[in-house]
Amino acid sequence: MRKVEIMSNSISPISISGYSLKDLKPEIQDYYLKKMSSFINKLPQDDKLFIEGLSNRLLKWKTVSETELVGKSPEEIRFIRRKQTGNPENNEEKEIIVDLTRKALAIIAEADAIIGGKAIAYIWHTRRDNKVVGKPDGENPYPTKEHGNHWDREGKMFLLRSWATEKGYLKDNKDVIFSDKLTDGSPGMAKGCRCYAEYLFAIELFPTVYKNCITIKGLDYIK
């Protein structure tokens, strides 16, 4: 019997205030910066100062200390906060920052699980409330290509391209597909998505209903 270390990881994105970019391993930093840059680049680029501030906030994790603001005029303070952290000035900008902050933690969790922990799959979890896209009687009953039916994904397992698939231990099927086949991305990546992933690091941890993705070679491996 193969010895299994019971590991799983989930993260509920709320704030990045407890993180420092330098705390992340270099390979996780690279993963995060590449993915977050792509999200920022997709935003309207009209307000250059706001975009610069977002980049400083989410790519360099800059902050504004009170000492930087001493003796400054209200307009100077506005400019500094806008330039350093993308300080929002309307509801749309607030929503952008909240969404990107959620994405930041989702990306870090994903990188930590895949690169650091060698995750092989994950279980999709929603907030199970009326805001979840796809809930028939909820606020957003109609999914789109940019934001799929996340209500239906609750509790479902998705495979990751990993050592287990490279060795031929796992294979996708009608019940279990690869995460990278989702047009709107993994949990937390679609616009406004509040979902999160419960990562799985061992084949033995797969829910019974999804064990049909384990190949004969995989079954021999876990004996």
Image: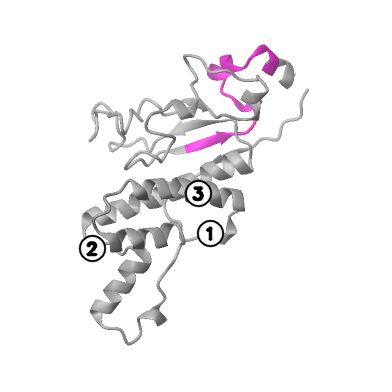
- How far apart are labels 3 and 1 at the CA level? 9 Å
* Residue occupying image coordinates x 64% and y 25%: 166
Q: Which residue is mark 1?
A: 21
In the image, residue 48 above or below residue 43: below
Q: Which residue is mark 2?
A: 89
Residue 56 within the segment the image draws in magenta: no
Q: Write down the region rendered in magenta.
A: 197-218
Image position of 199 (left or right of 63): right
Q: Are marks 2 and 3 in contact (CB under 8 Å)?
A: no
Q: Earlier in the sequence, mark 3 or mark 1?
A: 1
* Residue occupying image coordinates x 41% and y 62%: 56
Disc 3 marks a residue whose amino acid type is: Tyr
Disc 1 marks a residue whose amino acid type is: Leu
Way the structure is coloured: one colour
Q: Which residue is mark 3?
A: 32
x and y, in percent, of residue 46 in the image: 23, 55
